[in-house]
Image (tube, grey):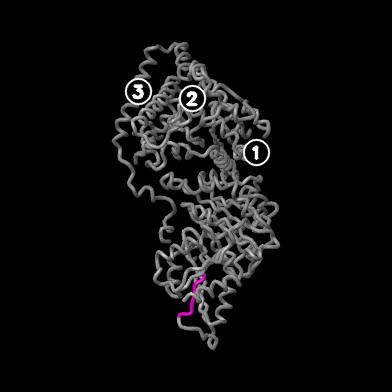
Amino acid sequence: MLTLTMSRALNEGLRCALRDDPRVLVMGEDVGALGGVFRVTDGLLSEFGPQRVIDTPLGESGIIGTAVGLAMRGYRPVCEIQFDGFVFPAFDQIVSQVAKLRARTEGRQPMPIVVRIPAGGGIGAVEHHSESPEAYFAHTPGLRVVYPSSPSDAFRMIRQSIALDDPVIFLEPKRCYWHKGEVEPEAELADMPPLLAAQTVRLSPQRGVADGPPRYSVSIVCYGPTVEWAMRAAEAATQQGVTVEVVDLRALSPLDLGSVEASVQRTHRLVVVHEAPGRVGLGAEIAAAVSERCFADLYAPVQRVVGLDIPYPPNRLEGAYLPTPERILDAVAMTLAAA
Amino acid sequence: MSVQLDRRSEIRADARAAYARMVEIRLFEEQVNELFAAGLVHGTTHLCQGQEALDVALAAVLRDDDVVAATYRGHGIALALGMTPASVLAEIMGRSTGCTGGVGGSMHLADMSIGLLPTSAIIGAGLPIATGAALAFQTRGEDRVAVAVFGDGASNIGAFHESLNMAAVWRLPVLFLCDNNVYGEYSRIDRTTAVLDLSRRAAGYDIPGESFDGMDVDTARTAIAAAVDRARNGGGPSLLEARTYRFAGHSRADKALYRPEGELEEYRKRDPIAVRRSALLAQGVSEGELAAIDARVADDIAAVVATVSADPLPDLAAMFANIWTEPAAAAR
């Protein structure tokens, strides 16, 4: 067991993949000599050489389009998009080719491409550098979208994503790159939990604190950078006698709705948290799915704690945009008040 | 050898077979047009009458293990590379016997076994894909060549620039073959494009560029062979502009009324099949022999239409298949 930052955990995951499978390539803008602006590809060029770790020109459509051609010739490219907002020039190749080629060729041409995207805000970096583009991709059949929240998940999920024959949009919570956590670098792929499985953590009030009424409980569904804040809100809630289940989705498409449903059936209340603007987002999808599957289990309307429906705000104002622990706690209180 | 590659090898060695393939493409497209009018082809189709010489020339030059990324105007290149008329027509007619089981359709022909990468409706999408295939060949040290066939309209897409630059900076074994048929969809090239000699754009990437008559199969073959040999031997990418003309409209519904008066008639005088016919006659092939070829191809196409029209549609399950590898289904 090693204690690594998320950036370093991803770096180790890429190193394992490059070492274990000669078909794996890492490519992108300044991923080689520089080692990536977030250091995720640091040292890979010197270890694996310029044919495996490729510095590309600046041009995202060209990068992803080239990856499609490489995949057609048997490679497994892992493409880095330098910042979330830079993925949009590649959107055409991703949604029109990468997502659809497998179906269009009756499964004969899989697209084992991973597109790594540092995503989300909270680092004072304004628009184009703080976007949360997950809903665009989750809306497209054929793409998998995943968003780890911890170093251990980042290490595990990057390895699983590279090993998978489906294309994966791999979002990395950039404000968590320097968070540390325990990573098991010797873990075998076969022993890992399924890539699409959500993780549910139940936090109960400590004895003596738990004065709340029966069924004083709530589920908080979150993913990526908001998991840390959901956990903080959950811990504060337990101090007030509330039982909280924090469901870290990990995979956004396909969605592990079974885990969400099971949690709601236990807690009867649901708060969905994400950083992307709320309108037509993942929160809306989850709320709709829960109302379809287990409406009768709900004691209160579903609450969304999400980014505002505005362009990503200027850096000095982003605190008012983000779904902070305080906003999550307010939403928890709303669900309890509704009962 | 597969049926497709046998068909490919025919046109390499035998000028009559190359002529026959051009006739096959012409009659095939005319047949698709008729089937569309009869309500038997749905959606849309993009026909390539007038551009047959280029498709056949390219197929005759390439080695069996080279690859081609082509466009939605792709029936001709598919037939030239060796796909059977039955396989292509069945795909166009949405039959389960088509080259991708009827799930692709006219714009999405593919046969990976002969190096035809899946075509697509997205203008210019094939350029970076061919570039990536060429990067794979270079990385593995294989002396194979990738070709991106694209229209004049695609030369204005951002991916055109990204691909040519990338291929040039890495000296990739790729040929960028622009089939300039004068029209990007419904607009004449001089209304949309600043440089009309499209091969001049090669200078921007410091790679060889050449324009040639794409309606003459021998001229096209010579130009393509030089660029393919250069790519195969480490000389890097080239940009070729084949000057052709689209006898049909952009898509099936387009009567192309935007053409200047007399333009189509002028180009028809250079009809690639008529040009080829004259050349073969001049080389001593008899009129009777050519007429026999024409008749045989027409019979073959008619037989294919009869067979394919009776082929089954895909099962409804086909539209849910192959979107993801299996575990995704478990996420319901």
Tell me which secondary structure the magenta stretch mostly adopts. strand
For badge 3, the amino acid type reads Ala
Quadrant location of the N terminus of chain B? top left
Q: What's drawn in magenta, residue-wise?
A: A215-220
Q: Circle 3 — which element?
A: helix
Residue density around tag 2, few if under 14, some if 14–19, many if 20 or more, within 10 Å: few
Q: Which residue carries the number 2 mark? A: B257
The Cα–Cα distance between marks 1 and 3, rounded to whole angstroms, is 44 Å
Please tell me if label 3 and label 2 are on a single chain: yes
For marks 3 and 2 on the same chain, the one whose residue lies earlier in the sequence: 2
How far from the left and from the top, in percent, is residue A51? 62, 47
Work out whether residue A163 or residue A253 is closer to the camera in this orientation and state it: A253
How far from the left and from the top, in percent, is residue A330? 57, 73
Up/down of B287 relative to A295, above or below: above
Query: Label 3 marks which chain's residue?
Result: B
For marks 2 and 1 on the same chain, the one whose residue lies earlier in the sequence: 1
Please tell me if label 2 and label 1 are on a single chain: yes
For badge 2, the amino acid type reads Leu
Query: Label 2 marks which chain's residue?
Result: B
Quadrant location of the C terminus of chain B? bottom left
Q: Which residue carries the number 1 mark? A: B165
For badge 1, the amino acid type reads Asn
Q: Circle 1 — which element?
A: helix
The Cα–Cα distance between marks 3 and 2, rounded to whole angstroms, is 29 Å
Residue A186 in view, yes or no: no
The Cα–Cα distance between marks 2 and 1, rounded to whole angstroms, is 37 Å
Q: Which residue carries the number 3 mark? A: B298
Q: Circle 2 — which element?
A: loop
Residue B8 falls inside the magenta stretch: no
Please give the name of the residue rendered at 63% of the width and 63% of the height, measured from the top-left corner: A321
Residue B127 left/right relative to B47: right
